[in-house]
Image: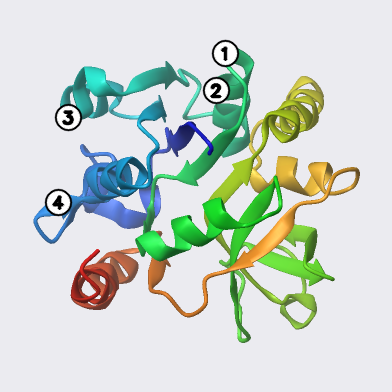
Amino acid sequence: MIPRSIILAAGTSKRLGDLTRTVPKCLLAIGTTTILDLQIRTLRDAGISDITIVTGFCDEQVRRHCGPSCAYVLNDMYDRTNSIYSLWLALRERRGAVVVLNSDVVFHPGILRALLDADAPDALAISFQDGLGVEEMKVRVHEGRIVDIRKDMDPAEAHGENVGLVKFSAPGAEALFAAADELVRAGVVRAWAPRAFQELCRTRALAAVATAGLPWIEIDFPEDLERARREVYPAIRRDGA
């Protein structure tokens, strides 16, 4: 059982405009809860109560909202870095087996359960689909393993989209930190966290775990938030999750 998680929540989310001018994206309302509260509840329901949140923009709001039940790592360079740097900060402080989440994903608990139940020690949740565009973090898979993950991939070469949930065993987390550390020390601090996953895949197996059609959405734009509120979260609730 993986005992802990890291939630990456440092960014400014400027593409949401006024919605996130003074509020971090993870604290936007979804039904009667927030994106972050929904993630934390899902993690705890799965037996993961050791939760570290990497904060940056509106750090104090997140800390006040979640309180002492979570641990925190501050990315005080959030306006000059991206999620690879937040991931590196969290892993530098503490490693070991871990689930890593982007803080802007609303997802069915069944996706997390499938990820945790997968036999592979290191695995990434993927939505197998066609018709991907420029915004999606695209993934290419060969024989059940991730072989490439990046936004600028030719959509014709992609097999699906990265959901934003990934698990690592203790050795996997060590290898991930080594990959992230090499990139950060080379000045690659404005990349997304999957850049480190991509480097890891060169030397270590990272399995693909399908969402199997369960509802989820990454929230980047106002229309994503609206769809999360109108379709995705109600679908999750209908399943009793």
Could you say which is closer to the camera, residue 224 or residue 167?
167
User: What amino acid is labelled 4 in the image?
Assistant: Thr
Mark 4–mark 2 distance (CA, rounded to whole Å): 26 Å
Q: Are marks 1 and 2 in contact (CB under 8 Å)?
A: yes
Determine the secondary structure under disc 3. Answer: helix
Q: Which residue is mark 1?
A: 93
Q: Is residue 181 left or right of residue 44?
A: right
Count every numbered label the image shows and give the total. 4
Residue positioned 39% across, 29% down in the render: 51
Mark 1–mark 2 distance (CA, rounded to whole Å): 5 Å
Q: Counting residues from the N terminus, which is met first, the one under dot 4 or under dot 2?
A: 4
Label 3 CA crowd tier, 10 Å (few <14, some 14–19, many 20+):
few
Label 4 CA crowd tier, 10 Å (few <14, some 14–19, many 20+):
few
Q: Which residue is mark 2?
A: 90
Mark 1–mark 4 distance (CA, rounded to whole Å): 30 Å
User: What amino acid is labelled 3 in the image?
Assistant: His
Q: Counting residues from the N terminus, which is met first, the one under dot 3 or under dot 1?
A: 3
Q: Which mark, by number, is residue 33?
A: 4
Q: Which residue is mark 3?
A: 65
| Above or below, 64 relative to 21 | above
Tell me the quadrant of the picture where the C terminus can be found: bottom left
Mark 4–mark 3 distance (CA, rounded to whole Å): 12 Å
Using the rendered view, name the quadrant where residue 143 is placed: bottom right
Residue positioned 66% across, 52% down in the render: 123
| Above or below, 182 relative to 239 | above
Q: Is residue 115 left or right of residue 112?
A: right
